[in-house]
Image (cartoon, helix red, strand yellow):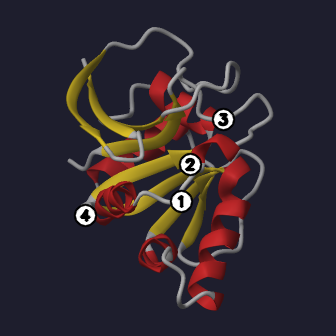
Amino acid sequence: MRKLKLQVQITADGFVAGPNGELDWMWMPGGRDEEVFNKVIELAASCDTLLLGRKMIREFIDHWENVVDNMPDSPEQPLAQQMVNMRKIVFSRTQTAMNGRNLEVENSDLASAVKALKEQPGKDIIVYGGAGFASSLISLDLIDEYYFFVCPVAIGAGMGIFKEKKALKLESSTAYKSGKVVNKYLPV
């Protein structure tokens, strides 16, 4: 059975976005950490399906397709190619179709749809969010592996992804020169 892996950037004080969805805290002074970027690429390569919530899809699709189509020299190109070419499923209660390469819209029950996807052959499945979508998957006990990219910043208030107590077991932790730490947790 395929695993569902949640990958999120998270602040040291446990938020995945600012109170109004701000993500400006993710970008570190001094530029991108290549080792962290390579970890993102490695995780994406272990998967062949990407799950996303409706609220973040347009910006996500537009960004990665623009990098592939218009920025051949971008250092993001390896990840952009993966994101554009990977099967993407967006979950929505309100829309039945959206534009984007390799993009499908799923309107059925979240738990049933994800369980069915896990039973299909193939590589693992990864989810990037948004916050509400990730929270729903967590509440339904659908996440098999958690990858928290902890940024060395506290923002004081924001959006979290945990709505109830959830016991997790630390599987591994890797610190990077930029100060980011990638913690892999498994549900208990």
Residue 58, how many percent across, how many down? 72, 62
**In which image quadrant can residue 179 be found?**
top left
Q: Are marks 4 and 3 in contact (CB under 8 Å)?
A: no
Q: Is residue 124 above or below residue 157?
A: below
**For the residue marked with disc 2, what is the amino acid?**
Met
Name the residue that disc number 2 marks: 28
Name the residue that disc number 3 marks: 17
Task: Say whether disc 4 or disc 3 marks the residue closer to the N-terminus.
Answer: 3
Q: Is residue 21 above or below residue 121?
A: above
Measure how far apart labels 4 and 3 are at the Cα level.
31 Å
**For the residue marked with disc 1, what is the amino acid?**
Gly
Q: Is residue 96 above or below residue 143?
A: below
Task: Say whether disc 4 or disc 1 marks the residue closer to the N-terminus.
Answer: 1
Measure how far apart labels 4 and 1 are at the Cα level.
35 Å
Which mark, residue 31?
1
Residue 56, how many percent across, how many down? 68, 52
In the image, which is nearer the foreground, mark 3 or mark 2? Answer: 2
**For the residue marked with disc 3, what is the amino acid?**
Ala
Q: Which sits in the foreground, 163 or 23?
A: 23
Q: Are marks 1 and 2 in contact (CB under 8 Å)?
A: yes
**In which image quadrant can residue 21 be found?**
top right
Name the residue that disc number 4 marks: 122
